[in-house]
Image: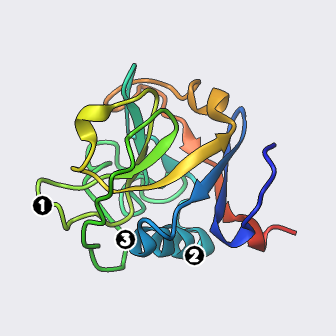
Amino acid sequence: MAEIKDPENTIILTLKDGEVVIQLLPEVAPKHVERMKQLARDKAYDNVAFHRVIEGFMAQTGDVEHANMEKDYNPRRSGTGGSQYPDLPAEFSKLPHARGSIGAARSMNPNSANSQFFINFKDNSFLNGQYTVYGQVISGMEHVDRIARGEPPANPDRMITVRVAADVA
């Protein structure tokens, strides 16, 4: 596992194959970082499916309303929901959508991001300036690479647990 320099702004995402460590970027997108930490602390991301996983592009998850595979999972609605919290304003920056970057999923409205996010499998520069980047995988990207593909996948993978590193004993 990577060295964690800022536990309060680091997420540990547990997948079936191992842990993924994400360094959050509060100086770039403070509202998105706070939302991810809130949902992690609420345990809202636990057991949420990766509902849209496109080879050579990205893995999308975070629909806490419709994609919890242990509670009210609805594969047809998965990807259409958010959280109990209000939508977030866009926090666009010059950071690129590089391999391992975390981007905020949203509708056509730039200010509609809520709980869903995606992890880029490769550099996706065509997304630059259009979606908020608020984190970067610093270890465990090999586990992300093994997430089941599909829209939705026939047998989706899930985030087993998502924790703020500062909260992990």
Q: Position of residue 121 (x, y in %)?
A: 46, 28
Question: Which of the image's four quarters has the N terminus?
Answer: top right
Instruction: Give the residue drawn at x 52%, y 62%.
Output: 25
Q: Residues within 10 Å of mark 1 (few under 14, many from 20)?
A: few
Front one among 104 and 161 = 104
Query: Mark 3 sits on what residue?
Result: 83
Query: Which residue appears farthest toward the left when viewing the image?
Result: 108
Front one among 45 and 164 = 164
Mark 2 residue type:
Asp
For marks 1 and 3 on the same chain, the one whose residue lies earlier in the sequence? 3
In this image, 69 relative to 41: left or right? left
Query: Which residue appears farthest toward the top when viewing the image?
Result: 56
The numbered mark at residue 109 is: 1
Q: Between tags 1 and 3, which lies in front? A: 1
For marks 2 and 1 on the same chain, the one whose residue lies earlier in the sequence? 2
Element class at badge 1 = loop
For marks 2 and 3 on the same chain, the one whose residue lies earlier in the sequence? 2
The numbered mark at residue 139 is: none
Instruction: Give the residue drawn at x 40%, y 42%.
Output: 60
Question: Which of the image's four quarters has the C terminus?
Answer: bottom right
How is the model colour-coded? rainbow
Q: Are marks 2 and 1 in contact (CB under 8 Å)?
A: no
Q: Are marks 2 and 3 in contact (CB under 8 Å)?
A: no
The numbered mark at residue 42 is: 2
Is 169 rendered above or below residue 123? below
In this image, 33 relative to 21: left or right? left
Is 130 rendered above or below residue 141? below
Q: Between tags 2 and 1, which lies in front? A: 1
Is 63 rendered above or below residue 114? above
Element class at badge 3 = loop
